[in-house]
Image: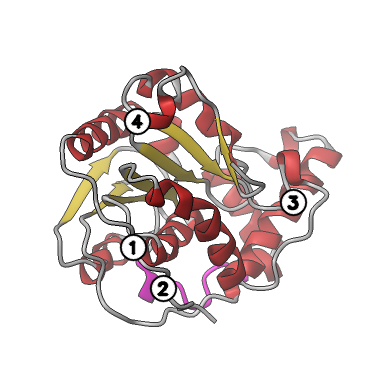
Amino acid sequence: MGSWISTWPAGPGDADLPALLCLPPAGAGCQQFRAWTPALAGVAQVYGVQLPGRENRWREPMPDTFGEAVEAIAAELRPIAAAGRRLVVFGHSFGGLLGYEVARRVTPDALVVSACRAPGHWTGAGRGIVDDDEELDKLFDTAGLDPAFLDEDTRALMVEMLRKDARLSLSYTHVPGGPLPVPVHTWGADGDETVTAQELAGWAAVTTAGFHVHRVQGGHHAVLRRPEPLLEHLTALLSESADRPARPEQPARPARTA
């Protein structure tokens, strides 16, 4: 793909399989989703969204606004929809918000989000990461990273990425519009102190095609730390979408974010 979307083909027939687009949380890159490829072999081709400022794009500047990032991702994703391939979008935390706005432009077969508050609850989210070192340290704790055991350079890079993504999230304004015509699945953890059950429940308002809630034990990143239940769920969704007739290509939609 292009600079915003990476993929890791597992076999020669992957280009004919349904596509799974994965969007990572703030401060992270998409290489973590490469490990999902074996579990989904023969089911889907895995794609990961790579924002600038990390991994293979660490020298590139961030976009000025959330909307610019969404439009760039959607532009690279549209050839998949144009080819008639099935598509499931998955995003974790900040990646779920990106995934939702991408789904408003390139309609997938399903949207799956984890540890992500609903769009209407995002106003001001991330401000603490930008302005407060104590809040930033709490975020390291929820990720299972003790700042005391990180070398200075590694911690500085992680802080820089987190704050860049937090600033990007502050440029987001939810512009209500027509609900998604695809099912939305939310995953939450009982021990998540970052996203409340009420904030997860707000996703019900963004779809007319079914809303489903899945719960696991653990903290904010529990779904990514132990992804087996999620991968089983994604396998079922992708297999189901592969059995349905191909969707017509969706027309490009105007920008919806500030």
The mark that comes first in sequence, 4 or 2, is 4
- Taking the magenta stretch, the answer to whether it contains residue 195 is no
The mark that comes first in sequence, 3 or 1, is 3
The residue tagged 3 is 53
Q: Amino acid at mark 3?
A: Gly
Q: Amino acid at mark 1?
A: Gln
Tell me the quarter of the image containing the C terminus: bottom right
Q: Give the alpha-carbon distance from disc 4 to disc 1, as whole Å.
A: 19 Å
Q: Give the alpha-carbon distance from disc 4 to disc 2, as whole Å.
A: 25 Å
Q: Quadrant of residue 244?
A: top left
The residue tagged 2 is 253
Label 4 sits on a secondary structure element that is loop
Q: Is residue 253 visible?
A: yes
The mark that comes first in sequence, 4 or 1, is 4
Q: Amino acid at mark 4?
A: Leu
Q: Quadrant of residue 37?
A: top left
Residue that appears at 75% across and 45% down: 57
Q: Give the alpha-carbon distance from disc 4 to disc 3, as whole Å.
A: 30 Å
Residue that appears at 65% across and 38% down: 146
- What range of the chain is rendered magenta? 118-128
> Tags 3 and 1 in contact by the CB under 8 Å rule?
no
The residue tagged 4 is 17
Residue that appears at 44% across and 36% down: 224
The residue tagged 1 is 250
**Looking at the picture, does residue 187 appear above or below residue 222?**
below
Task: From the top left corner, tell me how far across and down residue 1 is, in percent.
Answer: 59, 41
Q: Residues within 10 Å of mark 3 (few under 14, many from 20)?
A: many
> Tags 1 and 2 in contact by the CB under 8 Å rule?
yes
- Please tell me which residue lies in front, 215 or 245: 245
Task: From the top left corner, tell me how far across and down residue 154 is, in percent.
Answer: 79, 39
The mark that comes first in sequence, 4 or 3, is 4
The mark that comes first in sequence, 3 or 2, is 3
